[in-house]
Image (cartoon, grey):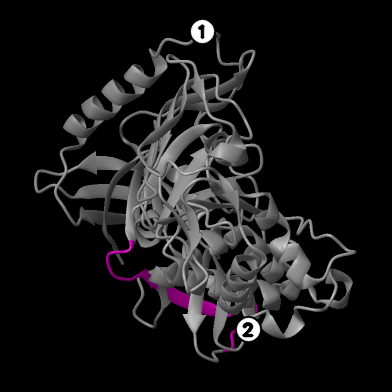
Amino acid sequence: MSRIELSHVTKRWGGFYAVDDLDLIIEDNAFVTLLGPSGCGKTTTLRMIAGLETPTTGKITIDGVTVFDSDAGINIPANKRRVGFLFQNYALWPNMTVFQNIAFGLSNIKESGLSVNSEGEIVRDPNATDAPRKLTKEEINRIVARVSAIVKIQPFMDRYPGELSGGQQQRVAIARTLAPGPKVLFMDEPLSNLDAKLRLEMRSELQRLHLSTGSTFVYVTHDQMEAMTLATRICLISNGVLQQYDEPLTVYNRPNNTFVADFVGNPAINFMNARGEQQADGSFALNLLDQYSGTFTPETKVNVNGWYQDAEREIAAFAAKERPAEKTNKDEPFKYPVAVVADVESKESVDRSDYVLGVRPEFIRICQDGPVEGEIFSAMPTGMETTVRIRVGNYLLTAVVFGGVLYKIGQHVRIKFDGEGTTLFSRVNGRLIACGKLDVNQ
């Protein structure tokens, strides 16, 4: 079992909080991606779990063993945590063959209760009392044969790294990481050096590798496509603060706030400012796009006044947390983008009647009976689909049309917001109020 638990983990330098009071549980055999923009704290989080960075405060356990506890003074070094590392730089020895690179670290292992089964897997007995021993040459050969087969690098065992492609070198680095039998495999943007086609292939290989090894994977990336396609759960961080920790499709369909909604999704979500009130039946009567009125119907009824009370209580509790130093990297409200043709005047202050509607491009449908009139601002066909930007007054909405449909710039079209793919956020705090259906009046 390789369950990882972080409890109130903080890392700061003076008043700069790289990671701010993080609570996180990574279950055994999970594939978790730490996702966020540059400087958000995702790599710092990975390095703290791995033992390469010392937290300022908090507690970390791996496989039920406390590896760091600021109160108890525990800090087990990285080489004692039985974890594997895979980085952007392959770090292969150029003067060693593939076999020698994979086997290199195995010759340094010296433990009691150590054995290698017939499948080439390292078996450790934590209760063993025999003298520590090293692996034999035959055992090392079995281990190398097993991990090289997993990553499909067997035909190149006698080659040197300079004779391999980038993808092949990455496979060697993965095999070397798997060879000592780590409990957890940490990866810090391991595919960023590869071209787009090879990255897609390696994503598939990493997914297959996760299933075949049964290990716990923790993967750092700023590429939301990697996070969506690889992870069993996504941990999205901004300014050192956890924004959402959920399965990929939950993050995509039910984002906790406007930051999450904007960061995940390509093409990006459409944001529209709206103003209105909740009706007696639970729906919201809204004015949007300067010239239209409509109704937002939540999929699950919500009392917006009660929702605001709960949200304000949570925000106040986070702000009131005791900190040994004032946070210099302030948690500013996310400035969500509203696409416009020309700058429009924005309200200086907002209140509880102000909302933000989020609509994914695939939920904007071009149809003859659509209630919203617009014109094609740009059209970018890719074969399987066409990304279209539609001008509605002074605003731009992005839609994805599947199939080989061609549109001309300036062409007049009508659109509707399809299905229950609309999200309603508070403009006051940026938090998700509800998901539901948006109907615009003709």
**Callout 2: few (<14), some (14-19), or many (20+) C-alpha neighbours within 10 Å?**
few
What amino acid type should be assigned to the residue bearing mark 2?
Answer: Thr
User: Quick check: 432 left or right of 411?
Assistant: left
Earlier-in-chain disc, 2 versus 1: 1
Q: Identify the element where label 1 is drawn.
A: loop
Residue reaching furthest to the bottom: 404
Q: Is residue 56 above or below residue 400?
A: above
Which residue carries the number 1 mark?
324
Residue 251, image x and y in percent?
39, 54
Quick one: 355 or 56, which is closer to the camera? 56
Residue 412 sits inside the magenta stretch: yes
Residue 119 among magenta residues: no
- Name the disc covering residue 382, or none: 2
Secondary structure of the residue carrying numbered label 2: loop
Most extreme residue toward the top is 324
Residue 234 visible somewhere in the drawing: yes
- Apparent side of residue 354 relative to residue 224 in the rendered image (left or right): left
Amino acid marked by disc 1: Pro
Q: Is residue 203 above or below residue 433?
A: below
Image quarter for residue 204? bottom right
For the residues bearing labels 2 and 1, Cβ distance under 8 angstroms: no
Q: 380 and 285: which one is in front?
A: 380
Q: Position of residue 117 (x, y in %)?
A: 46, 68
Q: Quadrant of the C terminus?
A: bottom left
Q: Identify which residue is drawn at 19% across, 31% down.
A: 305
Q: Main secondary structure of the magenta part?
A: loop
